[in-house]
């Protein structure tokens, strides 16, 4: 698999950026063949979920981890139809979303993301960039930039960071990735929210302005039990 990384450095750096703590609930979408779950276990994270379409990939990961696999919840499912039974602080997706090339599948993905992500939580989405490959593992992909990810996430999310990453494949080729972080907002004061996000993150890795809008009907992320540290100061959950 050309997108494979032995050490998932970009994902780990972005989790640090959003303030993921050892007790944060993290779900890795399409993470069956990824080494991210290994790295998170090594770093003491204790509330981990991995979802992948391939049961075989999940089985290989569980065998690789051995007894440590019991620390992880595993789901073999299609993300466009999977129904989450709980909520998460961090939704991590590196190279799964871009396989969804049909608008209906992209919409279904975002709806399930919204159901699974807590208010104040973060979605980290990595796809091939607009100048990246047109196919991945022989399959067509939908390439994205920060603006297209923001448009798909829609109401209730703010783009807090966007950055590019050049991934060197095992064969020595370069794949250009685009990573975007969307934060699910927890209050309705968009002007104040923008100021607080800028104070916490700066303007992000890209040049796009932050887009801050309140959650719309039936689209908002679910309410959290707490707010991640990066967004804690000055925010008050809606009631």
Image (tube, rainbow, N blue to C red):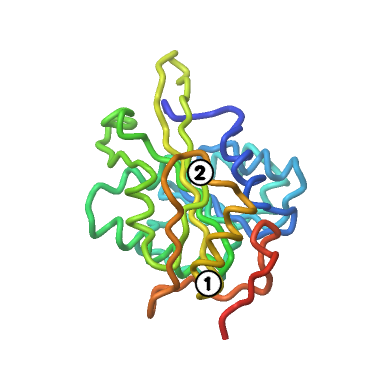
- The location of residue 193, given as percent across then percent down, is 55, 65
Q: Could you tell me which residue is drawn at 67 percent across and 61 percent down?
A: 228
Q: Residue furthest bottom?
A: 239
Callout 1: helix, strand or loop?
Answer: loop
Q: Position of residue 74 (x, y in %)?
A: 56, 55
Residue 44 visible in the shown view:
yes
Front-most of 29 and 56? Answer: 29
Q: Closest to the observer: 167 or 120? A: 120
Residue positioned 49% across, 71% down in the render: 221
Q: Is residue 142 left or right of residue 195?
A: left
- The relative height of residue 32 versus residue 91 in the rendered view (above or below) is above
Q: Where, by quadrant of the figure, is residue 217 drawn? A: bottom left
Q: Which residue is mark 1?
A: 85
- Is 4 situated above or below 21? above
Residue 94: horizontal and vertical position, in percent? Answer: 47, 41
Quarter occupied by the C terminus: bottom right
- Label 2: few (<14), some (14–19) or many (≥20) C-alpha neighbours in 10 Å: many
**Circles 1 and 2 in contact, beta carbons < 8 Å:** no
| Element at label 2 | loop
Of residues 210 and 104, the one nearer the viewer is: 210
Q: CA distance from mark 1 to mark 2?
A: 20 Å
Name the N-terminal-most of marks 1 and 2: 2
Q: Quadrant of residue 186?
A: bottom right
Check the picture and name the quadrant holding the N terminus. top left
- Position of 108 compared to 119: left or right? left
Vertical placement of residue 138 versus 203, above or below: above
Residue under pointer 2: 32
């Amino acid at each position: 698999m050309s997108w494979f990384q032995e050490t998932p450095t970009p994902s780990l750096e972005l989790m640090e950026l959003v303030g993921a703590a050892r007790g944060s609930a993290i779900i890795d979408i399409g993470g069956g063949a990824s080494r991210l779950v290994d790295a998170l276990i090594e770093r003491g994270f204790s509330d981990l979920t991995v979802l992948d379409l391939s049961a075989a990939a999940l089985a290989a990961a569980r065998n690789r981890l051995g007894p440590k696999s019991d620390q992880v919840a595993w789901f073999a499912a299609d993300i466009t139809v999977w129904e989450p039974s709980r909520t998460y602080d961090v939704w991590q997706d590196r190279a799964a979303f871009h396989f969804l090339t049909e608008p209906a599948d992209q919409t279904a993905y975002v709806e399930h993301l919204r159901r699974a992500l807590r208010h104040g939580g973060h979605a980290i989405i990595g796809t091939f960039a607009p100048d990246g490959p047109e196919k991945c593992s022989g399959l067509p992909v939908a390439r994205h930039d920060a603006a297209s990810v923001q448009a798909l996430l829609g109401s209730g999310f703010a783009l807090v960071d966007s950055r590019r990453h050049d991934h060197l494949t095992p064969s020595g080729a370069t794949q250009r990735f685009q990573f975007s972080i969307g934060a699910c907002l927890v209050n309705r004061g968009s002007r104040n929210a923008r100021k607080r996000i800028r104070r916490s993150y700066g303007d992000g890795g890209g040049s796009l302005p932050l887009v801050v809008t309140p959650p719309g009907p039936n689209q908002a992320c679910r309410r959290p039990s707490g707010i991640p540290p990066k967004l804690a100061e000055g925010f008050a959950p809606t009631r």
